[in-house]
Image: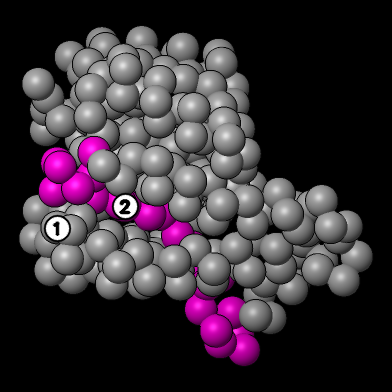
Amino acid sequence: MAKTILVGGFGPGISTAVAERFGAEGYAVAIVARNAERIANGVKALEAKGVKAAGFTADLGDAAAVKALIGNVREKLGPISVVQWTAYTGGAGDLLTADTAQIHTVLDVATTGLLAAVATALPDLRSEKGAVLVTNGGLLFNDPKVDAMAVAWNAMGLAVANAAKHKIVGLLAEKLKSDGVFVGEVIVTGAVKGTSFDDGTATIEAATVAKKFWDLLAARSENIATV
């Protein structure tokens, strides 16, 4: 049976490139997002490339929904070898005016859902000697210039979520290494072509990010790469 990767937060850009790259390497691919039409089109595109794919709709900020999702993916495609998390959401751009629900939503998609996915898939990840691969952004850095950008871009909530997600990567890498589960992160420090962040000046190719993930997993030595 082929190994299976779950791509959480499927959309144009990095998650599509990751699905295509791992699919080309022989993985069955489960793609997940809230938009059913996007998922249906994504499955068709992957199958057209010869990739075994299945689509699932779920709110990745809802821990209960994520736990159910893991069971559904397992039933459809078999044990989950890799959890890949690109899911994020905007909101809470100004932390001083955002309401509690906005702050919770941003953090839940970035962290609560990720942790629910890993915890629920953990028996598979252990038996498969699998991996958790996390996409992150440069706003995570604790640097005055970065903080100034986050404030100027009205992206304070995203900056906090990225920082929390980065810490989770380090903690899970330490926690799971004795189980043979690799935890890796690619930090994207610029705009990726073809995404909502691309205003026409983006320079990073999504395929480059996907290759970084593949290389991290293949080497299983360094936990963090930057692009």
Amino acid at circle 1: Gly
The residue type indicated by label 2 comes to: Leu
In the current view of this chain or complex, which residue is farthest to the front? 123
Q: Is residue 203 above or below residue 81?
A: below
Instruction: Identify the image quadrant of the N terminus.
Output: top left
Whether residue 138 sits left or right of residue 159 in the image: it is: left
Pointer 1 with pointer 2, Cβ within 8 A: no
Q: Earlier in the sequence, mark 1 or mark 2?
A: 2
Q: Nearer the viewer, residue 53 or 42?
A: 53
Looking at the image, residue 107 sits to the left or right of residue 23; the answer is: right
* Residue 144 sits in quarter: bottom right
Q: Which sits in the foreground, 134 or 173? A: 173
Q: Is residue 186 above or below residue 7?
A: below
**Can you say whether 132 is above or below 16 in the image?**
below
Numbered badge on residue 133:
2
- Provide the residue designation for mark 1: 180
Asked whether 126 falls inside the magenta stretch, the response is: yes
Residue 106's place in the image compared with 70, above or below, is: below
What colouring method underlies this structural image? Answer: one colour
Give x and y (percent) for residue 110: 55, 53
Q: Where residue 7 sits: x, y (%)? A: 37, 36
- Does residue 43 appear in the picture of this structure? yes
Q: Is residue 144 magenta?
A: yes
Q: Which residues are magenta?
A: 124-146
Q: Along the horizontal axis of the image, is 72 left or right of 154?
A: left
Is label 2 in a helix, a strand or a loop?
A: strand
Tally the numbered discs: 2
What residue is shown at x 49% (from left), y 27% (from top)? 68
Residue 205: x %, y % from top left? 34, 48
Q: Quadrant of the C terminus?
A: bottom left
